Image (cartoon, rainbow, N blue to C red):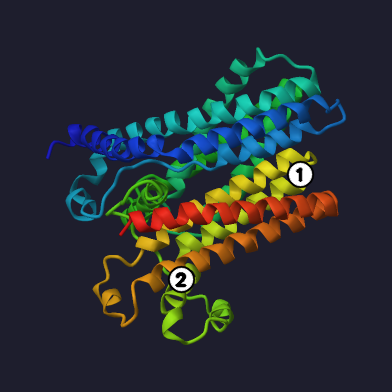
Amino acid sequence: MNKEHLWRDRFRSFNKEIRKYVQYIFNGHLLFVLLIGLGGIAYYYSEWVKTLDSSFPAEILMAIVIGFVLTNSPILTFFKEPDVIYLLPIEKDLKGYVNKSLLVSLMFQGYLLVMVLAACMPLYVQVTGGAFGDFLYFISVLLIVKYANLKIRWNIQRLPETSSGVIDFIVRFLVNVLFLYFLFLHAPFIYLLVLSIVIGGLWIYFEKIASGKLLKWERLIELENKRMMLFYRVANLFTDVPKLKNKVTRRKWMDFVLHFIPSTHVETYTYLYARTLVRSNDYFGLTLRLSAIGSIILFACNVVWAKLLVVLLFLYLTGFQLLTISVHHDMKMWLHLYPVPETYREQSLMKLLTIILIGQAVIFSLFTWIAGDIVQAIIALTAGILFVIGFRFYMMKKIRSTK
């Protein structure tokens, strides 16, 4: 093994793996739906920005949003399980490998910073009276601070105390938000200088205490696997991903939901899919996250057509992604031993997804009522139910195509 070529080979393998699934993602019709949704949100955002004046706390809001992006600094190491054995003898010679990983991580996360800052610039210009020309100055400073955060995060990951990561995130988030607030406020340079010294001091401090410590291979590999599993879950919406590993969690407090399902042959698959939805982190967490995000956006919207767009978009995203439950148990042979007709399987899945989507539509209509009025809530609920009825035909076609 040539350690000089190791990182290059790992990076090529990573790119090849990503490209293999990205082509399915960008060929899917979900991308078209997302573009429509993002276009509607962008239009609503631009109209909302026009209504703001200098009293709006734009600097604080931008500092919090971008501060989170700065603080969240995962490092792409490309480590794998066998590295615990095969790379351990040359661990002290991996400095060049780590530096390249930090630079690639800076490149990917720097692109995200550019996108977030670009989205915030209209807000900044409208409220503060600044110029779009400040963008280059801001992004230059942000990339430097981002690299410092990456270095601090890397040294934290080499410490034996796992609790250090939580404390580190909180401290860096507060420092980053304060730094960004003074940056966007065009505060006197001395404030930025003091906070820069604080960030540099954290960098030097953790560099010193992590010096000489061995890599925490198990932790680094676990973090790398989690990042790849997140990507695989997205790719699994468009094609089968053999490497996807599903995590199951026992949620005893959700058992009451299953008590409503009759213990009959007809409901065999209903119970199976309901149990899968409750226990699988992928489906359960996905439903909660989309419901929460959609509700928050609805609470902030005050335009009827924008609310309808949000309701339909999030119902589609939830229904489309939950459809993968239909193939969740396909590799289990015992499923074919059920003494029930195959048609029950299709009917059970259709019923379960319909109940979930209508329940989500009800939640969205409640938040629409809270943020608006009863008329808007009724319109949102009616549109959601009509969408679910129409979406059932798509679900039927999709489920049958997977057989």
Q: Marks 2 and 1: CB-CB under 8 Å?
A: no
Please, what is the three-letter code of the amino acid marked with disc 1?
A: Ala
Q: Please give the label number shown on residue 300.
A: 1
Disc 2: which residue: 348
Please give the count of numbered marks on the rendered protein.
Answer: 2
Please tell me which of labels 2 and 1 falls first in the chain. 1
Residue at 58 percent across and 66 percent down: it is 355
Please, what is the three-letter code of the amino acid marked with disc 2?
A: Ser
Placement of 247 over or under 317, stated as above or below: below
Which one is in front in this view, the residue at disc 2 or the one at disc 1?
A: 2
Q: Quadrant of residue 287?
A: bottom right
Residue at 25 percent across and 35 percent down: it is 7
In front: 60, or 263? 263
Q: Quadrant of residue 99?
A: top left
Residue at 45 percent across and 86 percent down: it is 264
Asked if residue 352 lies left or right of residue 340, the reply is right
Q: CA distance from mark 2 to mark 1?
A: 36 Å
The picture places residue 151, in percent across and down from the top left corner, at: 45, 37
